Structures are given as structure tokens and as C-alpha cells.
Image: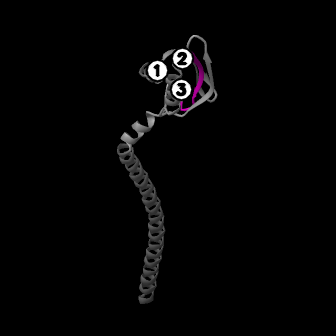
Amino acid sequence: MLTFYRQKDFLITLTLVIIFVILTVGLIFWLQTEAVTLAETTTTLSTFKNGSDQAAQLSVLAKQTASSREIINTYFVTPETVANFIGEIESLATSDKINLTVNQAVASPMGLDFNLYAEGSFNNLFNFIQLLDRLPFNVKLSKISLAHDAGWSAVINLTLISFDK
């Protein structure tokens, strides 16, 4: 009878050992799966953090360069500021004692084309043309026709290349 109890104890012990091994293997497998999931989550969080850091850096950079961007934007004429640009040209003409007429302003593939008619003395017209060429915008004087009848006049074709449509 003693052997029966020993066999029974052995079987119970063996069963417990097998159950323990199975549970241990299952636990190890589960832990490995969780570790992979944790690593993936950490990588995702790191990516979000890097993206957040970059967004914060871009925000700081935008704030730091705001005044410089405002200055740069003043060198471009938009549909909203065309009237100001024409006002600047008229102001130059007035200061040079030139009678100026803006005959035409038309958008073109190169920018904004102006046809100007100016009257005044030769020296004043010449100075006005030089001032137009020195405007703080990207302009191209494509045609200048001077005529002298009762006084001097000029037809000037000017293209504003720095026109931001």
C-alpha cells in the first residue's frame, strides 16, 4: 500500500510540476508579448514627443522671425496693396514735379504690368525714371519712350515682378 501512496504522490507532484512549467512558459510568453507592446508604445510616444518638440521649435522660430517676415513681405505687392504701390509711384512723380497718369495696370504671367504716361522737364523725367528703377520692389522697365513737343513726355511700361497674386 505504501507504493500506491508513493505512486499517487509522485503523480501529484509530477502533475504539479507540469502545471508549474506550463504556467511558467505561459507567463514568460505573456511577458514577452507585453514587453513588445510596451516597446511599441514607447516608440510611438517618443515619436509624438519628437513631433511635439518640433512643433514647439517651429512655433518659437515663427515668433522669432515674425518681424523679419513682415519686413520681407513689404517688398511684395499683393492685390490688396496695389493701390499703395500706385500711391508710391504717384508720390515719386509729385516730388519730381511730374504730371503722371496711370493708363493701365494688368496682371500678366511675369507680374503686374503698368502703362504710365508722364509729363515734365527732361531732367525731372530722367530722375523719375531712375527712381522707378530703384524702387524697393522687383520691377522691370520694359519700354521707355521719350517725346518732345511743347514739353517733354514719356510713356513707360513697368512690370512689377514682385507681385504676389
Residue 43 location in percent, x, y? 45, 59
Residue 161 location in percent, x, y? 57, 31
The extreme bottom residue here reads 2
Membership of 79 in magenta stretch: no
Mark drawn on residue 93: 1
Sooner in the amino-acid sequence: mark 3 or mark 1: 1
Sooner in the amino-acid sequence: mark 2 or mark 3: 2
Q: Quadrant of the N terminus?
A: bottom left
Under mark 1, the amino acid is Ala
Work out whether residue 48 or residue 164 is closer to the camera in this orientation and state it: 164
Work out whether residue 6 or residue 43 is closer to the camera in this orientation and state it: 43
For the magenta stretch, what is the residue range? 152-162
**Residue at the spot of label 3:** 126
Query: Which residue is located at x 55 percent, y 13 percent?
Result: 151
Quick check: 54 above or below 111?
A: below
Label 1, residues with CA under 10 Å away: few <14, some 14-19, many ≥20: many
Quick check: 28 above or below 112?
A: below
Q: Quadrant of residue 105?
A: top right
Q: In this image, 109 relative to 2: left or right?
A: right
Under mark 2, the amino acid is Ala
The extreme front residue here reads 150
Under mark 3, the amino acid is Phe
Membership of 159 in magenta stretch: yes
Q: Is the magenta region chiefly helix, strand or loop?
A: strand
